[in-house]
Amino acid sequence: MKKLVTFPIIFLVCSLGSAQSPIATLTNNSLHCNANISIMVKDLQSGKTLHSHNASNSFVPASTVKLITTATALEVLGADYRFKTTLEIEGIISADSVLQGNLIIYGSGDPTLGSSKLGNINFLNDWISAVRKAGIKQINGNIIANASVYDTEGINPKWLWEDMGNYFGAGAYGISYKDNTFEMELRSGAVGTTPEIVKITPNIPELTFKNYLRSTTIRFDSAYFYGAPFVNERSIYGEIPANRPSFKIKGDIPRPGLVLARDLAWKLKSSGISVTGIATDEAGVSGRRTVIYTHLSPKLTEIIQEINSNSNNHFAEHLFRHLALQSGIQASSPEAVKRINAFWKSKGLPVDELFLYDGSGLSTVNAVSANFFVSLLSYMDKSSNNSVFRASLPVAGKSGTIRNFLKGTSLEGRVQAKSGTISRVRAYAGYINTNGNRFAFAVIVNNPNSTSTIETRKKIEEFLIRAQY
């Protein structure tokens, strides 16, 4: 009997108070009764904290982690930084223009090579011109993709199995290519049947699939690839719409360096430069090497724009790992975490509230407080990189991943922020510009009483609109 009496009392406590304060609007309701919520809003001019709730408590932040990755990169590397990929020869060029040795692609983790998002998609034309300029008409050796500047882990060990093998969880390697993503074309039949695999692009002959897909009445892509880095087998589970003559889904390329080496070899041969050896990502490089060409990525300014505006996991993970190289050792996730923590500790930020494992926010064991985010945003507000950092953030109701956030409200166009959304998580962190004043804010909500976080988004919008500035 006591349980029957207690429940409505708890519900009443959760439901009351929404009119008492902006924070109560977000915290005291049936949706968020059992949620973990961290909130902070700070006036950047006076330094005064206007709103705070569990501000120093760390919760899962999802893609708002990208603010940490991009801010650190800007401060450590600089806005004009570019990734370098070099073409190198191992051997000698004879008098008759024959390279007696290997042509090596030596990577530094550039995520933009052949990317559909950023950079020159036809960059191989420049590489062919460089080989010609070096006086090479024939290669008596192999085309080698050397990605050893990064470790071979590829996929962050703290990611979910559901992420591995999918385009949004593509691996980060010393050499990445075409966003490390392939596109699969399927042909689906009647409900209950297994869709037929038509082709994949780019062609990866050794890649095989175990197809457990089903054609159903679903109207969207609910297919998932499963598979590990460097393993040439993928399993496909889930559903796609029935009776579609063509339906496309995306997965990750398990050995992008190999695909790039093959494409370069093909391009060389089709341009009249013969290659007697093979294209590989496995052969070691032992001899003396000479650089014949250096390929530069777009500037970091453009890369972080893509990361923060469109929440690009692939770019973020490459940038995250690349930070470890500044310590003079092979890039890895653990070394990147050490680098990031050490940097922000040196700046006086509360790193005891930062539990970081990746650079994109896919990991569900990341945990960050609203206080840490606001401290980071406050620091960047005074940084020489402030204008670049702010410009990388999408605008509420206008652009990027928050184009629908606060749309049609008094804050449309006045908020620049990064959003974060994974299962049972909704978070936002960024800047508010209103009435001639500037504010930094962060709101993180974990485990609302709903399988969807759309209602949580609405509550966050209501809080931000009602907050007094």
Image (cartoon, rainbow, N blue to C red):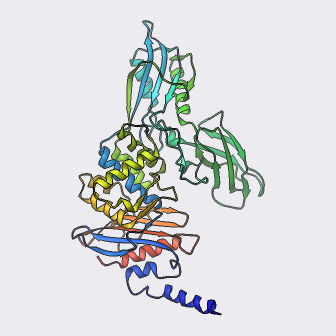
Q: In this view, does 130 lie to the left or right of 269?
A: left
Furthest residue to the left? 46
Quarter that holds the N terminus: bottom right
In this rendering, the answer to whether 293 lies above or below 19 is above
**Going 68% across and 47% down the picture, which residue do you hit?**
235
Name the spot of residue 226 as percent of width and height, x first. Answer: 64, 48
Total count of labels = 0
Furthest residue to the top? 95
> Could you say which is closer to the camera, residue 417 or residue 241?
417
Residue 231 appears in which quarter of the rendering? top right
Name the spot of residue 386 as percent of width and height, x first. Answer: 27, 55
Name the spot of residue 267 as percent of width and height, x first. Answer: 52, 25
In this rendering, the answer to whether 60 lies above or below 247 is below
**Going 51% across and 56% down the picture, which residue do you hit?**
363
Residue 191 appears in which quarter of the rendering? bottom right
Name the spot of residue 153 as percent of width and height, x first. Answer: 53, 42
> Could you say which is closer to the camera, residue 332 or residue 410?
332
In this rendering, the answer to whether 228 lies above or below 25 is above
Q: In this view, does 448 lie to the left or right of 430?
A: right
**Going 39% across and 43% down the picture, which residue do you hit?**
324
Quarter that holds the C terminus: bottom left
